[in-house]
Amino acid sequence: MLQISSKPAKRAILVIFTKSTYNLLPFFDLDEKKSIHEKLNDGVQIISFSKQQKTYLLLPIEMDATTNEDSLHEKLRIRGNTVYKTCKELKESEISIELLGNIPKEQLISILLGINLSCYEFLKYRTKQKSFNLSIHIDPIILDKESILEINTITESVQITKDFVNEPVSYLTALQYAKEMQRIGSAVGIQVTTMEQKEIEEERMGGIIAVNQGSSAPATFTILEYKPSNPKNENPLVLVGKGVVFDTGGLSLKPTRSSMDMMKSDMAGSAAVFGALHAIAKSKLPYHIIGLIPAVENRPGYEAICPSDVITMYDGTTVEVMDTDAEGRLILADALHYAKRYKPELVLDFATLTGSAMRAIGKEASVMMGNAGKDIKKKLKKAANFTGERVVEFPLWEEYGDYMKSDIADLKNLGPVDAGAITAGKFLEHFTDYPWVHFDIAGPAYVASPYNYRGKWATAYGVRLLFKFVQNLCTDELTRTEKKSRNNVG
Ligand code: BES
Ligand code: ZN
Ligand code: ZN
């Protein structure tokens, strides 16, 4: 984590400098500068130098006017990851930051965020907790305190999301998940209410009940509310997240070679919603937001729903369940119906919904679709590109909807093999009556090999995207509410 301090660290200094100013590097004599210059010409990303028991890590930054802004920030975060790896290699657990040359604030923030995000490890189940902790000391003259704290808040929220996703179901049942959200959420001013199995049954949330039926652990439906005293929005923004704490596929059991072990991550959408709300609440952003988290375990068992069963959803729609492994859409549909009561200005849902989305685009982006207007989608894409949590938009043309019609019920939960991400989106669309955007994060949420500063396994995809989106909404010069009151005055 970043420490606000003007004291230089004992052993290591990280000098971030523009390539053109290498000549001004303090602490080095001519020969050393020559060697640094050679390394720079070789395109080395980070140069380490020791002198009088001190380590100097030199991070050259190229200001290339032709690079686009978004890819530059991604590059800088990845540089941050290189700094982290170098510190770990050299066992330098404390560094302090020095700047040389004109490095814009936003760029410095991206480097620091890249270092900070790289620090995550999931150590809970290691009996020998061999860990490396890095403290980064930074003088508030170099970067204002607010920005330093924001980097730490985002990092902390990302870590919370990652911990949730990396937790196996042996610990993180739906009920345990709800309890932890209660504990962590209330500490930052989020109001957390959980409906338990009995209430879910009384409400007749048919999708949630059906999916959890094969499990002996109860389902939960958790409502998170962050309502600051001075919100910029009139009607709330609602965030919905898929919370399948484990997805075996149910009676349509996942085959042996389909990496079922990865399915503890099938609640990553809900964990991203929680993490984002955590960051937003902790930063006290003036935006009213509701989070809806349906949490279930999808298992086979005597009580489990059978392929061909017809269920009645929360909104009354009947669904023929052709494949019990297409469970995410069933629980999300009930949550999307629940969202209607808020008259939301916008609903965003995050879900590890289909293998089809992952095959289409890999870990590099989520698949985004929805009926919300161009303006909203543009803002979402802007935040996505800026944070490197990229999105690719897929269409929701009417024709795709025909694939989800059932012979004996209103809908079925399974379409043909082609266009699986879209037909899943089409299914969800049926349960919305407000501006809505769906993010299928099956690709980027959980990765089997290290992915730069995002790390290995849980990546917390969505947390930074959502935070940035809401932050931009708060600072947009004219929010809808202001526009309205201005019109009224005029
Ligand atoms: N949780 C899975 C989707 C998934 C697959 C997420 C791989 C992450 C990695 C989802 O519930 C599922 O099983 N989807 C099926 C849907 C199909 C039966 C229509 C799929 O994608 O195969
Ligand atoms: Zn499934
Ligand atoms: Zn699933």
Image: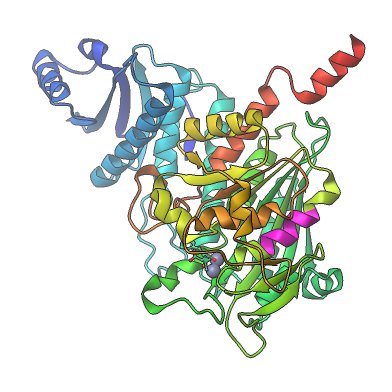
Q: Image check: 314 left or right of 457? A: right
Q: If the picture is divided into quarters, which one holds ligand 3?
A: bottom right
Residue found at the very far bottom of the displayed protein: 302
Nearer-the-camera pick, 459 or 39: 459
Which residue is at a point 66% across and 55% down the rendered structure image? 428
Q: Which residues make up the magenta segment?
A: 331-338
Q: Is residue 285 magenta?
A: no
Nearer-the-camera pick, 8 or 272: 272
Q: Image check: 212 left or right of 317? A: left
**Image quadrant occupied by the C terminus:** top right
Main secondary structure of the magenta stretch: helix
Q: Would you place residue 202 above or below residue 94 in this image?
A: below
Q: Would you place residue 271 above or below residue 405 in this image?
A: above
Residue found at the very far right of the displayed protein: 489
Nearer-the-camera pick, 191 or 16: 191
Residue 468: x, y in percent?
58, 33
